[in-house]
Every structure is written in structure tokens, then in C-alpha cells.
Amino acid sequence: MKKIYYLSTCNTCTRIIGELNLPEGFELQDIKTEPITEQQIEQMRELTDSYESLFSKRARLYKELGLKDKSLLEDDYKNYILEHYTFLKRPVVLFNNKIFIGNSKKIVEAAKNAIHA
């Protein structure tokens, strides 16, 4: 599996994809124009410890909906991500049954090392 879930309008996602210097065979999915399916999020969840780890607490809607003041359960995180693309922490890189979530330097470096090992 070689796939990246990203947002084409996000400069950070675009920069990271460029930095990763992807070999052929990677599939890119713009989550704004091609929303994530339940099957896809479940596949991501199998590779990480929780739906919460896939959830972006930096999303504007997170604050607007007052979610930081609520106790969210795993199903809540999953449903919010499925409901609106902005809740997925981006980018999500799937490579050889490994998952790399988000844009921290450490995560991007780990993804680069895995892809080019």
C-alpha cells in the first residue's frame, strides 16, 4: 500500500509531498474532492492506536463546534473525520503497512526514511 491522504489546497501538504520525493506507484487522494470512506478510515485505524490519533484538534471547526469542551469517544472522532475532511490530521502517508500521520518534522523524516530505505 502506497497512498497519501492530503488536501491540495494545503501548502504544508504540498510541501511535504514534494519533500518526500515519492517513487512511482504512490496514489494521492485529495480528501476535499474525494472524501474518505468508512473502509479507508478503518484501514488507517488498523495501523494506529486510535481514531483520536487521526483527528486534527487544530481544525477551525474543532473550536467553532466547541469540541474541545466535550469528552469525545473513539466513535465520535471517527464520525467527525467522516463528516468533514478538515478533521483528518494531514497528510496521512500509508506505506508498506506503516502509517505516518501529520506534518511534524519527526513524522515527515520517519516517512522519508521508510520510503527511501
Image (cartoon, rainbow, N blue to C red):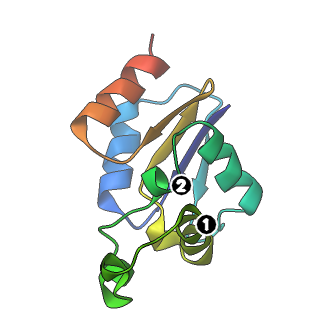
Q: Amino acid at mark 1?
A: Asp
Q: Amino acid at mark 2?
A: Tyr
Residue found at x 42% / y 54%: 90
Q: Which residue is mark 1?
A: 75
Residue found at x 48% / y 21%: 115
To which quarter of the image does residue 36 belong? bottom right
Q: Which mark is residue 107?
A: none
> Marks 2/1: CA distance?
8 Å
Chain-order first, disc 2 or disc 1: 2
- Quadrant for the N terminus, please: top right
Q: Which residue is mark 2?
A: 51
The secondary element bearing badge 2 is classed as loop
Residue found at x 52% / y 48%: 50
Residue situated in front as seen by the camera: 96 or 7: 96
Q: Is 14 situated left or right of 104 in this image? A: right
Asked if marks 2 and 1 touch (Cβ < 8 Å), the reply is yes
Q: Residue furthest left?
A: 105
Assess disc 1: are there few (<14), some (14-19) or many (≥20) residues with their C-alpha within 10 Å of its C-alpha: few
The location of residue 33, given as percent across then percent down, is 61, 71
Residue found at x 73% / y 61%: 38
The location of residue 68, given as percent across then percent down, is 31, 77
The location of residue 39, given as percent across then percent down, is 76, 54
Reply above or below: 72 against 38: below
Q: Is 43 situated left or right of 108 in this image? A: right
- Quadrant for the C terminus, please: top left
